[in-house]
Image (tube, rainbow, N blue to C red):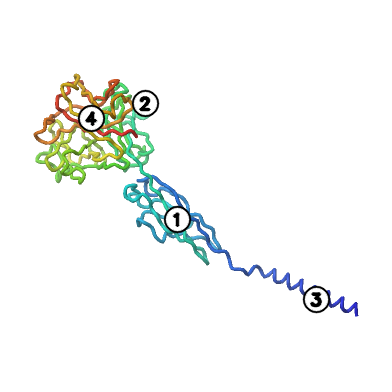
Amino acid sequence: MKTTLKISCCFILIFLLTFSCSSDDDGDTSPPANVSASDFTNSIAENSENGTIIGNVQATAGQGDLNYVISTQTPNGALSINPSTGELSVANSTLFDFETNPSITASVTVSDDLSSATSSVTVNVSDVKDVIYKHTASVGNTEGEDTFIDHPYLNANPNAKIAISHNWNDGTYNNKTTGVWYNPVEMKWAIFNEDTTPMLEGSTFNVYIAMDGELITHIATEANQGTNSSYTIIDHPLANGNPNQKLIVTTTWDPNSVYNPKNYGVWYDGTNWNIYTEGASDIPNNAAFNVLIKGDAAEEFSHQATAANISGNYTIIDHASLNNNPDAKFVFTHNWGAEGDSRNVVLDKTLSLWYTGTNWSIYTEDLSVIPEDISFDIVVTDN
């Protein structure tokens, strides 16, 4: 009996072990893990170009490959996502405007073969202020009439908006009208002499880079010509009907490849601001101008030359933001004013700025005398 019982117990034990092993071989029958997705938050500078990478939505799969889709976003069309990697990028750069959209939100659906999850996306848009950068022509950056600017906001950015003024304080006169253009081969912006004569090494320029301010490109055409072809009418809501508006004007070779070797000022006709040739000559058809209408984080004011502040070929500026500040940076344009103003003075001269040791001044490049009552619009920024 003991022998029989022992054999029976062994049989039962072998059976149980066999059944247990067989069950393990069948695999884990528990449900597969679900997709999990983390919320995403990052920051990006306003006005970032289309295609700029913002970051990746992080997720893990349960079964199969992951697929990423933007299900909702505010504002619509701001973001795009790589459906395979979850990489977020800028789809519409105009929507990345701090003043309009300080943050951009979205919901991203992440799915695999069996399940899905949602990631809440927040992209904070940082405010980028206008800057003024000092550029000096050198052997390394000058070729012919061009001196090429090397600045991260401008490099490989044909849509950048800039205005310039010559700055003597490296001790080089440049009695030439200068403009700007974008060289697609160098992928850089250049300052050039409009008459195509060689750029003098040492020529220094204050370059205003409009990151958030209003800087437009105005094209002189027959449609916006004044009563004669020596001036062109600007039509912009920030300037129309505003006789106190400050304007900074720079000629640009883009987009129509027009050389424009003339001195320009601005004047107000009672309704619109106009750009005019100081010598009353014709403006070339399709000539282009960069016009700064509103600076961001910039101080704007007017300076008028008087007997008290004129010394030969320059007029001394007395302003708190410039006085005793050799590192101050500003750009300027001659403002003829409205008809009947005391400042109705024409000056067909190339103008520049320099620091006397205590004050900044505006001077004529040919050293001719600055006339009384002539007025200038000035835009200063400490960025």
Mark toward the start of the polypeptide (2 vs 3): 3
User: Which numbered circle lies on residue 65?
Assistant: none
Instruction: Name the foreground residue: 321 vs 241.
Output: 321
Horizontal side of residue 327 vs 311, given as left or right? right
Mark toward the start of the polypeptide (1 vs 2): 1
Q: What residue would you read off at disc 3?
A: 12
The percent position of residue 269, horizontal first and vertical second, equals 12, 40
Q: Nearer the viewer, mark 2 or mark 4?
A: 4
Question: Where, by quadrant of the figure, is residue 240 drawn?
Answer: top left
Residue type at mark 3 is: Ile
Determine the CA span between mark 1 and mark 2: 44 Å
Residue type at mark 2 is: Val
- Determine crowd level at label 3: few under 14, some 14-19, many 20+ residues with C-alpha closer than 10 A: few
Mark toward the start of the polypeptide (2 vs 4): 2
Instruction: Name the foreground residue: 297 vs 334.
Output: 297
The percent position of residue 205, horizontal first and vertical second, equals 30, 29
Mark toward the start of the polypeptide (4 vs 1): 1
Name which residue lies at 37% across and 34% down.
150
Name which residue lies at 15% across and 31% down.
278
User: Which numbered circle lies on residue 139?
Assistant: 2
Helix, strand or loop under label 3:
helix
Q: Vertical placement of 124 versus 191: above or below?
A: below
Question: Where, by quadrant of the figure, is residue 149 drawn?
Answer: top left
User: Which numbered circle lies on residue 177?
Assistant: 4
Helix, strand or loop under label 2:
loop
Residue type at mark 1 is: Asn
Q: Nearer the viewer, mark 4 or mark 1?
A: 1
